[in-house]
Amino acid sequence: MALELAGKTAIVTGAGSGINLAFACLLLSRQCNVVFADLALRPEAEELVAKHASSSKAPAKAVFQKTDVRNWAELEEMFNVADRVFGGADIVCPGAGVYEPPWSNFWDPPGMPPSKDSPRDNHYAVLDINLTHPIRTAQLAIAHFLNPKDPSQRAPVSPSNPRSIVFISSIAGQVTPIVAPIYNATKHAINGFVRSLAPLEAELGIRVTAVAPGVIKTPLWTDNPEKWRLIGENDEWVTPEFVAERMVDLVEKGEIEVQSSSVPSTGLSSGDERDGAKMVKVKGGFILEVSRRVRVVEQFNDPGPSREGNMVTQMSVADREIFDRLKGGGWGVKS
């Protein structure tokens, strides 16, 4: 059930940078209001919000709501802001995420620097951000879609009055590099969660989909020296803007063009080669790999990510460092 963007309102967590910023920018260009929910805005995001402030002449408006996505009260407040300022939300993207940073990382156990996770708190921040926050945001989105604050302004969701939730998964929802096991687990979980909510579209008019990007040139990589060093000279990037365009497609289109996921008769099982483009119907539970190729990630018998735009050729350097630490003695044991 496609959704016309003009005149609608979106909530985007993590909109201060990266893919989420590109998505918010594209929504605004399509006359869709946006609540930027993030801890802070990069300068380019600040400029964009200012350009679309309520006092501006821009056809779509933007508002920044400071949000720590680990805090459920702050997640609720971003929906309250959408209600107060725009009359409610039509599109929700719980996009904020981290790539297993040193301060919440499987290979740096709680209570052991540089981890900031405490063994007394009984949780990992990376799980709170990458998994719990999207799940809780989806709960809140569905509740607000079904029960708008002012039905005279915004009718409840229905198949004839659809809404959309777009998640950001990753090719890490299929592949499993040892350097980021918790991150991998969260993206596998997001894929399962999105597919679980697929029936909402036919019954209620709520389309739940996800993009699964490859290696994207965002601050997650460029502002992180530990990760930047893993990128090889010939590794291919995909831009945040390209991913954002595919996210808009998932919201507003009934059909999109993708690469075939079939594996040629050469016997390859890695999915390195694909057939040509085809048109597919967008529906709830859709997970779209976005790299140099765009393809549907099938639930069963999927050939796996293509190589183009998905390779981090120096990842073995980080793998070796992990093994050296584990073999060095004393890992995970407080002195």
Image: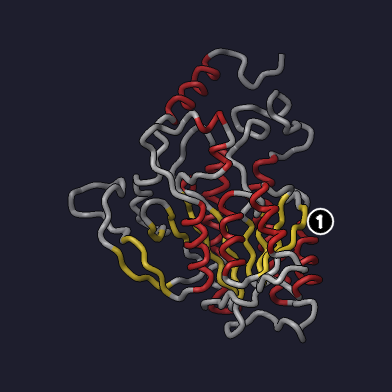
Q: Residue at x 81, y 56 (%)?
A: 73
Q: Residues within 10 Å of mark 1 (few under 14, many from 20)?
A: few
Q: Is residue 328 at all visible to an observer of this figure? A: yes
Q: Residue at x 62, y 49 (%)?
A: 17
State the image coordinates of residue 72 (x, y, percent, origin top left): 77, 54
Give above or below for 63 relative to 181. Answer: below
Q: Residue at x 55, y 63 (%)?
A: 196
Give the secondary structure at mark 1. Answer: helix
Picture quadrant where residue 276 is located:
bottom left
Image colouring:
secondary structure
The one nearer the camera, 18 or 261, is 18
Q: Where, quadrant-wise, is the C terminus in this rendering?
A: top right
Q: Is residue 139 at all visible to an observer of this figure? A: no
Q: Residue furthest left?
A: 266
Q: Residue at x 54, y 49 (%)?
A: 187
How many numbered marks, from 0 up?
Answer: 1
State the image coordinates of residue 54 (x, y, percent, origin top left): 76, 68
The one nearer the camera, 236 or 173, is 236
Picture quadrant where residue 80 is located:
bottom right
State the image coordinates of residue 266 (x, y, percent, origin top left): 18, 49
Give above or below for 110 relative to 88. Answer: above
Q: Residue furthest front?
A: 57
Q: Is residue 303 left or right of residue 332?
A: left
Which residue is the site of mark 1? 73
**Amino acid under label 1?**
Ala
